[in-house]
Image: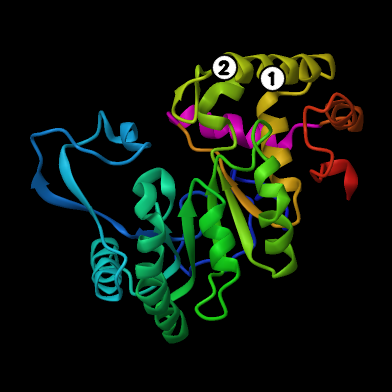
């Protein structure tokens, strides 16, 4: 794993664009396919899966899913035109999982396998994109994609499934398999919808008592060792050999400065040992002290 950029909160190893960034001269330009937001406005209730409440306060534009090859190519063309560029570093296929599609998710996956996967592979071969992968909130689609013999993705954007609070399922197969096959994983949502850093939500809804109790136990250990909880959350995500980057997200600009400071904070080895001894992290979870 490459070290974090000393100028920003991004830590990764993928090729960068030749354009100049106002942040640190190096960045990854990515886009997504699969979920399209149309000009048409909907006036009635919308049913967008168990995570549909994410869009409750968003714009009322109609959203449709299109994982076909044609739909993917149109989406990429639109993105290139809007951005004013002729290539992208990375493209994520979004929401290809049960939490958005319910029991139909496997059928959607098959559509993407014969459509979006192949289209993006051809674009990669032509140099229009450098890499592609899935952007999901569950591990199952990533596991399926890892087993494919054709059109294999370069990485996954996995949100909320490899955090201090929730990592056991990903550790069972996905993380070690991805590391073995050199498929990189970007960790999204390292603060578990905010509950780790003072918020009240876990999985985009009010955190249940058992989650709040675990957060308090982790915070108690952090306070004893004078470790910022953000630093612990980010470093845990990046400690696994399969982790290529972490995306904290930010509600306002000053949060980005906090994330940068957290990545630079010193964390004593005894902090990690105590987390493991108290079974606040899985015994098999790689920690910074294991390198």
Q: Which residue is mark 2?
A: 198
Q: Which residues are magenta?
A: 251-266
Residue 57 vs 50, above or below: the answer is above
Q: What colour scheme was applied to this rendering of the protein? A: rainbow
Q: Is residue 79 part of the magenta span, yes or no? A: no
The circle on residue 214 is 1
Residue 219 vs 106, above or below: the answer is above
Quick check: can you spot residue 246? yes
Q: Nearer the viewer, residue 173 or 273?
A: 173
State how many labels appear: 2
Q: Nearer the viewer, residue 211 or 29?
A: 211
* Residue at (46% x, 61% y) in the render: 20
* Residue at (47% x, 33% y) in the render: 250
Q: Where, quadrant-wise, is the N terminus in this rendering?
A: bottom right
Dot 2 falls on a residue whose secondary structure is loop
The extreme bottom residue here reads 126
The circle on residue 290 is none
Q: Nearer the viewer, residue 37 or 52?
A: 52
Our reading of the magenta stretch's main secondary structure is: helix
Q: Is residue 246 left or right of residue 64?
A: right
x and y percent of residue 26 in the render? 55, 59
x and y percent of residue 289 in the render? 89, 42
Q: Is residue 137 left or right of residue 60?
A: right
Quarter-wise, where is residue 36 in the image?
A: bottom left
Q: Nearer the viewer, residue 138 or 80?
A: 138
x and y percent of residue 139 in the render? 57, 51
The extreme front residue here reads 103
Quick check: can you spot residue 26? no
User: Which label lies toward us, 1 or 2?
Assistant: 1
The numbered mark, 1 or 2, whose residue comes first in the sequence reads: 2
* Residue at (63% x, 56% y) in the render: 12
Q: Is residue 256 part of the magenta span, yes or no? A: yes
């Amino acid at each position: 794993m490459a070290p974090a950029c000393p100028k920003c909160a991004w830590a990764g190893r993928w090729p960068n664009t030749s354009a100049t960034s106002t942040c640190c001269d190096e960045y990854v330009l990515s886009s997504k396919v699969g979920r399209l937001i149309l000009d048409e406005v909907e006036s009635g209730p919308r049913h967008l899966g168990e995570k549909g409440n994410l869009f409750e306060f968003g714009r009322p534009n109609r959203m449709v899913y299109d994982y076909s090859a044609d739909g993917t190519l149109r989406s990429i063309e639109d993105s290139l035109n809007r951005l004013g560029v002729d290539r992208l570093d990375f493209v994520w296929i979004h929401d290809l999982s049960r939490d958005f599609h319910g029991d139909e998710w496997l059928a959607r996956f098959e559509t993407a396998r014969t459509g979006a996967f192949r289209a993006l592979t051809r674009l990669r071969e032509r140099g229009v994109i450098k890499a592609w992968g899935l952007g999901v909130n569950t591990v199952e689609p990533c596991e399926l994609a890892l087993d494919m013999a054709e059109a294999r993705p370069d990485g996954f954007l996995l949100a909320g499934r490899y955090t201090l609070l929730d990592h056991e399922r990903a550790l069972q197969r996905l993380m070690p398999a991805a590391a073995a096959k050199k498929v990189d994983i970007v960790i999204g949502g390292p603060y578990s919808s905010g509950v780790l850093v003072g918020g009240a939500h876990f999985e985009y809804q009010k955190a249940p008592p058992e989650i709040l109790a675990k957060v308090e136990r982790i915070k108690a250990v952090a306070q004893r060792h004078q470790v910022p909880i953000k630093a612990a959350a980010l470093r845990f995500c990046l400690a696994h050999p399969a982790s290529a980057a972490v995306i904290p997200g930010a509600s306002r600009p000053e949060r980005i400065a906090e994330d940068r400071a957290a990545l630079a904070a010193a964390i004593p080895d005894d902090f990690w040992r105590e987390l493991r001894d108290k079974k606040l992290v899985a015994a098999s979870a790689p920690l910074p002290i294991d390198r």
